Image: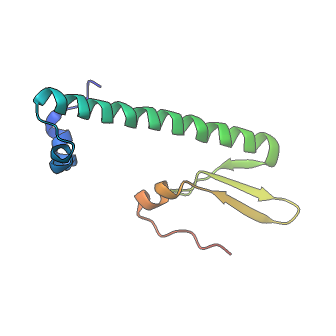
Amino acid sequence: MNKLKLTDVLKRKNIYLYKAKNIQTSEELIKAITDAYLSSQEETIFGEFLEKLAIFVSQESMNGFKSGIEGIDLEIIDDKSKIRYIVSNVNKLIKSKKKPIKRI
């Protein structure tokens, strides 16, 4: 929270969004920015926890591993059928601006 600066937030955010939300006072603006920031932090922490949990469970049960490919969370290789399963967050792939991996 100490790293949050109003000038940085205003550069990234569409100021018309706050106008559309009928934010009238500086107090309402600061509260909206703070709430959005905290919500984003909570989502990040929760997402990282779930990713680590999924990797652990797949390692223990299916010989899975954390992928080294950007945008891919988890890879599992089935030794019997030689099929590689890839688990990714679609939003993460879109944000990485990489071309999606072709499925064979």
**Residue 77, quarter of the rendered image:** bottom right
Q: Nearer the viewer, residue 66 or 22?
A: 22
Please give left or right for residue 6 compared with residue 56 in the image. left
Left or right: 8 in relation to 95: left
Q: Quadrant of the C terminus?
A: bottom right
Q: Residue at x 15, y 26 (%)?
A: 27
Q: Quadrant of residue 56?
A: top right
Tell me which colouring the rendered structure shows: rainbow
Q: Residue furthest right?
A: 80
Image position, residue 43 (x, y; %):
46, 37
Please say if 75 is above or below 7.
below
**Is the N terminus in the top left, top right, bottom left or bottom right quadrant?**
top left
Looking at the image, residue 61 lies above or below residue 30: below
Q: How many marks?
A: 0
Percent of width and height locating residue 38 = 35, 30
Residue at 81% in and 59% down: 78
Q: Residue, x 73% and y 55% (percent of image)? A: 76
- On screen, residue 26 versus residue 103, left or right, reads left
On the image, which quarter does residue 60 sit in? top right
Q: Residue at x 68, y 55 (%)?
A: 75
Residue 69 is situated, as x and y percent measured from the top left of the image, at 55, 57
